[in-house]
Amino acid sequence: MLEQSKSTIENLISDELWINAHRVLIYSSLWDEVDTSLLLQKYINEKSIILPTVIGDSLELHEYVSPNTTIIGAYGITESTGPIVTDYNSIELAIIPGRAFTPDGCRLGRGKGYYDRLLSLLHCPKIGICFPFQILENIPVDPHDIKVDKVIY
């Protein structure tokens, strides 16, 4: 999956939304998702990176300072212990995971609604990143599901 991750990441970093964004929300990848550690390593000194942290039924946002300021949190996800971010309007781009996406931005998550609740608070462009096999013509959609603006694979 590392080679497929590299291809998706290359497509992302060549996108104008990525190039022009300075403050970016990125997810910490699980084993079956596009590996975002590639972004964290490469852009730690070029962009202000924010990582989500699971707190109860919500995602709290924290600045990613360095690999030394992370812990393994809920569900085995790497989470930042950096300063909390409460100014959601300061986020210029959000990179969002999904189990599957449709070409027009519908997203299938893991079923707990963490990202749907977070996405409803963000006013920046949202990009879903995934592997090509995760693009499907149709996926189940609920009324509370929030689309991403663009899907990159």
Image (tube, rainbow, N blue to C red):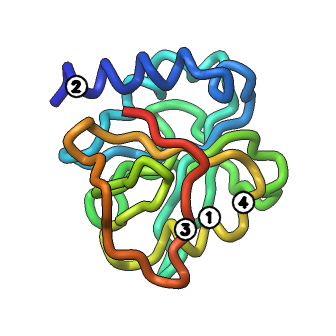
Rendered residue at 54%/48% (across/down): 51
Report the front residue among 60 and 114.
114
Callout 4 touching callout 3 (CB < 8 Å): no
Q: Nearer the viewer, residue 11 or 59?
A: 11
Q: Secondary structure at mark 2?
A: helix
User: What amino acid type is highlighted by mark number 4?
Assistant: Leu
Q: Which residue is mark 1?
A: 119
Q: Position of residue 27 (x, y in %)?
A: 46, 47
Q: Quadrant of residue 31?
A: top left
The image's mark for residue 4 is 2
Give the residue type that dot 1 points to.
Leu
Task: Specify whether 63 is left or right of 33.
Answer: right
The label on residue 122 is 4
Q: Residue furthest front?
A: 137
The CA span between labels 3 and 1 is 10 Å
C-alpha distance separating marks 2 and 1: 26 Å
Quadrant where the C terminus is found in the figure: top left
The numbered mark, 3 or 2, whose residue comes first in the sequence reads 2
In the displayed structure, 130 sits above or below 39; it is below
Position of residue 72 measured from the top left corner of the image (x, y, whole percent): 33, 54
97 or 22, which is in the foreground? 97
Report helix, strand or loop for mark 1: helix
Query: Are the residues at dot 1 and dot 4 in contact (C-beta closer than 8 Å)?
Result: yes
Q: Residue at the location (58% across, 22% down)?
A: 15
Please tell me which residue lies in front, 51 or 3.
3
Q: Residue 59 shows which numbered tag?
A: 3
Q: Which mark is residue 84?
A: none
Specify the amino acid type for callout 2: Gln
- Distance from label 1 to label 4 (Cα)? 5 Å
